[in-house]
Image (cartoon, rainbow, N blue to C red):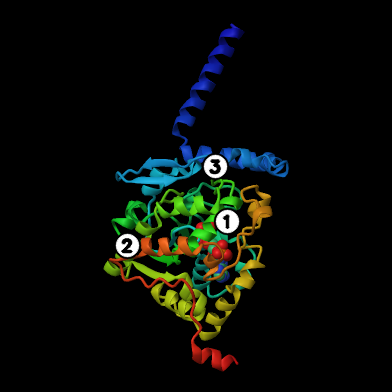
């Protein structure tokens, strides 16, 4: 009798567990597993023993998105493609959209400050990855993703980072035009160099190979998040068609006149800032300031064994024109030709270097 009761109770327990598990989403499972590994310090230990490299993806994954597009991503992000497409957007959402390594962190911090009365004190109290989650990841430690965004209070502004191409943003955003998008564009030569280094630093990405190999892969879109050219072009088209829905800014203009760009982002978001607030934001968001700020420079991801800072820093150089230290004359000429061919039909002004105006030079002399 006791045995029968025990067997029945076990069957009921297994049944309940299976029912519950069948309702658990794959992204939540991924999040739980990642958090358990992190909290048990398993990944941390592996990182210290130099074993994390063994877990890096060797190849990229090609996924067909719910609207039938082919998208290149890293294996860990594969399960998220459909979830992001179905994400319920809100009118007061702000999406900081970029191709990787184009200045998302910079603009996330600027936007957060614009939306929070330039309160740098509060900003310095909490990680940017908690204040402005990444829509395309799951919640892992202090790096928040889609699950947190889904639960965010209705009356608060969700400022989030997104790297995916325009066509596969959440349908609510791409099709129904909910929320506002700020697209940050950066010249592709500097993007390629920054991305090359980041492939060494990030355990989620495959090793980059040699510079020549990486450049070849980048040129044909065989890298995570796909083809740079179509990414930039499609966002540009949206900006031309729907300037109320999207603002298009460049990394180079942020570098050359940060105050002016902060002002135009604030205007786009319908926020009034005083000249003092603009100065506060510009000062807080200079490269030197952000590089030394542990709440935005991703240092905590080293402790979480997500990034390997022995290979380089997240806030690496923050310059326009670093590509000149990597591209050979021939590589540069071939890439220029590609840019000319692929970007012909857009009017984006691509600045590969910042020209110092003569009058400015004279003033400073
Ligand atoms: S990511 O991983 O895709 O989200 O990276 P992302 O934040 O888009 O881009 C990282 C590059 O932006 C530089 N950066 C800055 N440059 C100038 N000023 C400020 N404040 C700033 N903050 C971040 C960062 O250094 C990366 O560029 P590189 O060329 O690698 O230095």
Label annotation for residue 341 = 2
Q: Residue lying furthest front in this view?
A: 330
Name the residue nearer the viewer: 217 or 92. 217
Q: Is residue 37 above or below residue 155?
A: above
Q: Is residue 305 above or below residue 29?
A: below
Q: CA distance from mark 1 to mark 2?
A: 27 Å
Label 1 residue near ligand 1, CB within 8 Å: yes
**Which residue corresponds to the image point at 47% horizontal and 58% vertical from the top-left?**
161
How many numbered marks, from 0 up?
Answer: 3
Name the residue nearer the viewer: 194 or 246. 194
Quarter of the displayed picture in which ligand 1 can be seen: bottom right
Name the residue nearer the viewer: 139 or 337. 337
Q: Earlier in the sequence, mark 3 or mark 2?
A: 3
The mark closer to the camera, 3 or 2, is: 2
Q: CA distance from mark 3 to mark 2?
A: 42 Å
Label 1: which residue?
197
Relative to 312, 185 lies left or right = left
The mark closer to the camera, 3 or 1, is: 1
Quadrant of image for the C terminus: bottom right
Label 3: which residue?
31
Quadrant of image for the N terminus: top right
Q: Earlier in the sequence, mark 3 or mark 1?
A: 3
| Local SS, label 2 | helix
Task: Answer whether labels 1 and 2 touch (C-beta < 8 Å).
Answer: no
The mark closer to the camera, 1 or 2, is: 2
Relative to 302, 105 lies left or right = left
Q: Residues within 10 Å of mark 1 (few under 14, many from 20)?
A: some
Q: Residues within 10 Å of mark 3 (few under 14, many from 20)?
A: many
The image shows residue 157 at horizontal and vertical percentages of 46, 63
Q: Earlier in the sequence, mark 1 or mark 2?
A: 1
Q: CA distance from mark 3 to mark 1?
A: 26 Å
């Amino acid at each position: 009798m006791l045995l029968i009761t025990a067997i029945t109770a076990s069957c009921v327990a297994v049944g309940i567990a299976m029912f519950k598990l069948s309702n658990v989403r794959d992204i939540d499972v991924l999040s739980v597993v990642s958090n358990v590994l992190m909290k048990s310090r398993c990944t941390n230990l592996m990182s210290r023993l130099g074993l994390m490299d063994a877990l890096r993806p060797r190849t990229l994954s090609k996924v067909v998105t719910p609207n039938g597009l082919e998208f290149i991503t890293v294996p860990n992000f594969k399960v998220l493609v459909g979830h992001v497409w179905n994400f319920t957007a809100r009118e007061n959402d702000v999406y900081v959209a970029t191709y990787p390594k184009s200045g998302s962190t910079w603009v996330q911090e600027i936007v957060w400050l614009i939306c929070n009365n330039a309160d740098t004190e509060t900003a310095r109290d909490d990680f940017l990855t908690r204040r402005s989650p990444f829509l395309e990841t799951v919640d892992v430690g202090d790096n928040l993703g889609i699950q947190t965004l889904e639960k965010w209070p209705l009356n608060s502004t969700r400022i989030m980072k997104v790297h995916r191409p325009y066509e596969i943003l959440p349908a609510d955003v791409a099709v129904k035009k909910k929320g506002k998008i700020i697209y940050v564009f950066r010249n592709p030569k500097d993007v390629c160099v920054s991305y090359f280094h980041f492939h060494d630093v990030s355990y989620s990405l495959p090793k980059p190979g040699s510079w020549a190999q990486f450049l070849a892969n980048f040129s044909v879109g065989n890298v995570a998040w796909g083809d740079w050219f179509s990414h930039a072009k499609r966002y540009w088209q949206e900006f031309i068609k729907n300037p109320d829905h999207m603002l298009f800014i460049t990394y180079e203009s942020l570098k050359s006149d940060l105050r002016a760009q902060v002002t135009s982002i604030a205007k786009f978001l319908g926020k009034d800032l005083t000249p003092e607030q603009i100065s506060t934001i510009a000062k807080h968001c200079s490269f030197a300031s952000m590089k030394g700020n542990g709440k935005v420079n991703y240092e905590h991801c080293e402790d979480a064994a997500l990034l390997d800072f022995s290979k380089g820093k997240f806030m690496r150089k923050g310059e326009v024109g670093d590509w000149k230290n990597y591209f050979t004359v021939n590589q540069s000429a071939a890439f220029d030709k590609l840019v000319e061919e692929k970007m012909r039909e857009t009017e984006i002004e691509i600045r590969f270097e910042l020209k110092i105006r003569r009058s400015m030079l004279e003033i400073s002399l």
